[in-house]
Image (cartoon, helix red, strand yellow):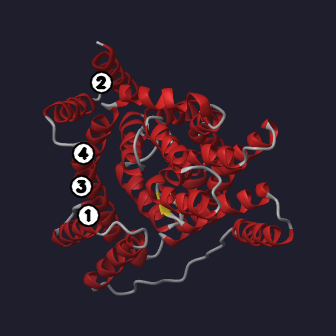
């Protein structure tokens, strides 16, 4: 992938956005499962980029703070059509889940009923495991190019399997790239290149953080505090929704008491059954936290949650992606990408193991996982249809 490809407008922006919407409808689970959907739709079926390109973007976005899968698909949008298409990609990808989760913050008296109905979603988890297992297999074949990358991937798998703290993921990725460069023993790793980072986006990113923090000190208003909180979640957390949710729980439930433990966990259970980014949970949390005044204020709270948590990741992609394509001209960076890609592959393998264990080793769950893998591997059944089949099976098993 070169810098010209990275900024060359695609001739069919509406077609690309339709494919992004398909990804949004079929992306259940965490970022690793989302990436398997990107692999199926954007790489294998539509060929917007290669598997190697996708792995590079996953590695890049794993290093950055923010929602990994959202930043990955936004980076693909930037690659295909620049900043405008990247923005539209984020909207199409995140808006459906954000709207639904924001609306659910108004349905407090029905959440009990909806929580019971989540039994209909009992096969979504095992299905998502099938997605990630197949993705782990496909990506492992690409990233293991020699003995060193095989060793790096195995070590990364073991480390990220047993150490799930957010800091470990960017650290292991950086170490993987460093080991790859040192082991190569190549000469002339660094040559002079012309680098012109778009500093404007980084300045906007930093100014917003400072401005919102200052606003909380100047104004004791709940909406101001919510705006700062969700923006801060967006730039301090590495990984997917599973990582940011504990941070939200600590502040919104335990410290600020904006909602009860049960209300928070009910929303988290509901978002598990929705396609799209798990960061959309912020719209629910923002709406619930802004209750008690009037419905417009609650709407604003949901909007602040949805926009605030995604905005830092979007700005960082705007800044880093063009700079990233220029940096890749360096031999050292190209070599480092081999190790980073192997680490990313190991992280996905570890996620597959964890999801398989979490899903439960029951005969029914394993059957659903295997069936999902077979349907995906056939490349004849689209991901949304597989999701509908899982939902239908859950409905029949619940009400039969």
Left or right: 303 in relation to 219: left
Residue 40, image x, y percentages: 36, 38
Cβ atoms under marks 4 and 3 closer than 8 Å: no
Spatial distance from mark 1 to mark 4, Cα to Cα?
Answer: 15 Å
Looking at marks 2 and 4 on the same chain, the residue that comes earlier in the sequence is marked by 4
- Judging depth in this view, the residue of 5 and 39 nearest the camera is 39
The residue beneath circle 2 is 380
Q: Nearer the viewer, mark 1 or mark 3?
A: 1
Q: Nearer the viewer, mark 4 or mark 3?
A: 4
Q: Could you tell me which residue is drawn at 72 percent across and 63 percent down?
A: 228
Spatial distance from mark 1 to mark 3, Cα to Cα?
Answer: 16 Å
Q: How many marks?
A: 4
Residue 257, image x, y percentages: 63, 57
The residue beneath circle 3 is 140
Q: Eyeballing the image, is 390 above or below 57?
A: above
Q: Could you tell me which residue is drawn at 39 percent across and 86 percent down?
A: 188
Q: Splitting the image into 4 quarters, where does residue 349 fall? A: bottom left
Looking at marks 3 and 2 on the same chain, the residue that comes earlier in the sequence is marked by 3
- Judging depth in this view, the residue of 97 and 33 nearest the camera is 97
The residue beneath circle 4 is 133
The residue beneath circle 1 is 161
Q: Give the crowd class for mark 4: few <14, some 14-19, many >=20 residues within 10 Å.
A: many
Spatial distance from mark 4 to mark 3, Cα to Cα?
Answer: 11 Å
Looking at marks 1 and 4 on the same chain, the residue that comes earlier in the sequence is marked by 4
Residue 163, image x, y percentages: 30, 69
Looking at marks 1 and 3 on the same chain, the residue that comes earlier in the sequence is marked by 3
Residue 171, image x, y percentages: 39, 76
Spatial distance from mark 3 to mark 2, Cα to Cα?
Answer: 22 Å
Element under label 2? loop
Element under label 4? helix
Q: Splitting the image into 4 quarters, where does residue 41 fall? A: top left
Looking at marks 4 and 3 on the same chain, the residue that comes earlier in the sequence is marked by 4
């Amino acid at each position: 992938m070169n810098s010209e490809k990275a900024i060359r407008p695609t001739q069919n922006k509406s077609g690309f956005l339709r494919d992004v919407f398909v990804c949004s409808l079929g992306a259940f689970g965490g970022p690793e499962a989302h990436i398997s959907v990107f692999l199926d739709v954007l790489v294998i079926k539509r060929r917007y980029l290669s598997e190697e390109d996708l792995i590079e973007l996953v590695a890049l976005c794993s290093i950055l703070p923010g929602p990994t899968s959202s930043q990955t698909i936004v980076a693909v949008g930037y690659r295909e059509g620049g900043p405008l298409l990247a923005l539209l990609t984020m909207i199409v990808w995140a808006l459906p889940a954000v709207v639904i989760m924001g609306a659910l913050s108004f349905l407090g008296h029905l959440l009990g009923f909806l929580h019971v109905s989540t039994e209909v979603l009992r096969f979504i988890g095992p299905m998502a495991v099938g997605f990630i297992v197949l993705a782990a297999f496909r990506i492992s074949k690409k990233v293991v190019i020699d003995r060193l990358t095989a060793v790096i991937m195995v070590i990364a798998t073991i480390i990220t399997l047993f150490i799930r703290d957010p800091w470990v993921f960017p650290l292991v990725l950086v170490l993987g790239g460093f080991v790859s460069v040192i082991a190569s023993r190549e000469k002339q790793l660094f040559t002079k290149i012309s680098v012109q980072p778009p500093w404007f986006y980084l300045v906007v990113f930093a100014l917003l953080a400072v401005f919102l923090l200052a606003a909380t000190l100047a104004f004791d208003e709940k909406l101001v505090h919510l705006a700062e909180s969700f923006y801060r979640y967006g730039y301090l957390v590495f990984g997917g929704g599973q990582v940011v949710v504990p941070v939200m729980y600590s502040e919104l439930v335990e410290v600020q008491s904006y909602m009860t433990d049960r209300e928070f966990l009910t929303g988290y259970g509901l978002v598990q059954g929705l396609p799209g980014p798990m960061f959309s949970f912020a719209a629910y949390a923002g709406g619930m936290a802004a209750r008690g005044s009037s419905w417009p204020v609650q709407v604003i709270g949901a909007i602040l949650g949805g926009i605030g948590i995604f905005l830092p990741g979007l700005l960082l992609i705007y800044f880093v992606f063009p700079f990233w394509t220029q940096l890749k001209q360096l031999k050292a960076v190209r070599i480092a990408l081999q190790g980073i890609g192997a680490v990313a592959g190991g992280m996905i393998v570890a996620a597959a193991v964890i999801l398989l264990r979490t899903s439960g080793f029951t005969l029914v769950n394993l059957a659903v996982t295997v069936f999902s893998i077979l349907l995906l591997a056939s490349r004849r059944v689209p991901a949304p249809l597989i999701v509908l089949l899982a939902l239908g099976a859950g409905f029949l098993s619940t009400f039969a």
